[in-house]
Image (tube, rainbow, N blue to C red):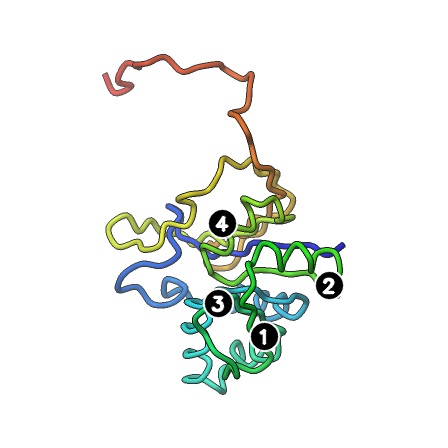
Amino acid sequence: MQSVMIDFIISLDGYASADGWPGLWGVESPEYLAWLEADDTDYDVLMGAKTYRLMSDFAAQMPDDPGFQAMAAMPKVVFSSTLDEPLSWANTVLVTDDPVGWVRSRKESGERPMRTLGSLSVCRALLSAGLVDRFRVVVFPFITGATGQERIFDGYPDVGLELVESKTFDKGMQLLTYVPTILDRPPAGGMGSMPESQPDAGR
């Protein structure tokens, strides 16, 4: 049985990107980039058409970049009904089937674990179908309330997260890896229901 990991980089307030900000929110962290390059070699990488177009264009523009060279060597799967073969990015397979059915089958018969790259709708579908074994985020130390784009968690079910790994990189990014559990109701117990109104703590 192979595993599936959702993998995101996000701002603290849960955005995938922000208008006018450079990639990785402009943070240059040799420690993070070294970890990312080493980690990327062990998975089949899953993505949707939008992410494929974006990342393959970057790869074509920066063929000598070590990060994109490593990504070119990785086995990649793109789910799309709009792309056509042959695909220009090396080691990429086009799948026109539903991602949920394809991933469910590969969990049973595949040879490598799988992880996602971006692709919010693919990740949402896989998580909702109960196919995700790990949920990993790298949280960048920014709040992008005015400029944030692509709210990652909109449309998700309620999910409980058990923390199984954490790491702080040299520029303050936090790596958090969880085991996700879809919740059919809010957790019971604790302090109970909050009162309808609370006094202003500043008064």
Quick one: label 4 or label 3, which is nearer the N terminus? Answer: 3
- Is residue 152 toward the left or the right of residue 34 in the image? left
Using the numbered discs, state the Cα–Cα distance from disc 4 to disc 3 in whole angstroms: 16 Å
Tell me whether the residue at label 2 lies in contact with that at label 4, contact meaning CB atoms closer than 8 angstroms. Answer: no
Quick one: label 2 or label 4, which is nearer the N terminus? Answer: 2
Q: Residue at x 50, y 54 (%)?
A: 138
Q: Quadrant of the C terminus?
A: top left
Q: Which residue is mark 2?
A: 110
Q: Which residue is mark 4?
A: 124
Using the numbered discs, state the Cα–Cα distance from disc 2 to disc 4 in whole angstroms: 21 Å
Q: Secondary structure at mark 1?
A: strand
**Mark 1: few, some, or many residues within 10 Å (few <14, many ≥20)?**
some
Q: Amino acid at mark 4?
A: Arg
**Mark 3: few, some, or many residues within 10 Å (few <14, many ≥20)?**
some
Q: Secondary structure at mark 4?
A: helix
Q: Which residue is mark 3?
A: 80
Using the numbered discs, state the Cα–Cα distance from disc 1 to disc 2 in whole angstroms: 14 Å
Q: Secondary structure at mark 3?
A: loop
Q: Amino acid at mark 3?
A: Ser
Give how far across and how far down residue 36 sits, in percent.
57, 66
- Nearer to us of marks 4 and 3 is 3
What numbered label is drawn on residue 93? 1
Using the numbered discs, state the Cα–Cα distance from disc 1 to disc 3 in whole angstroms: 10 Å
Q: Nearer the viewer, residue 98 or 118?
A: 98
Query: How many labels, in total?
Result: 4
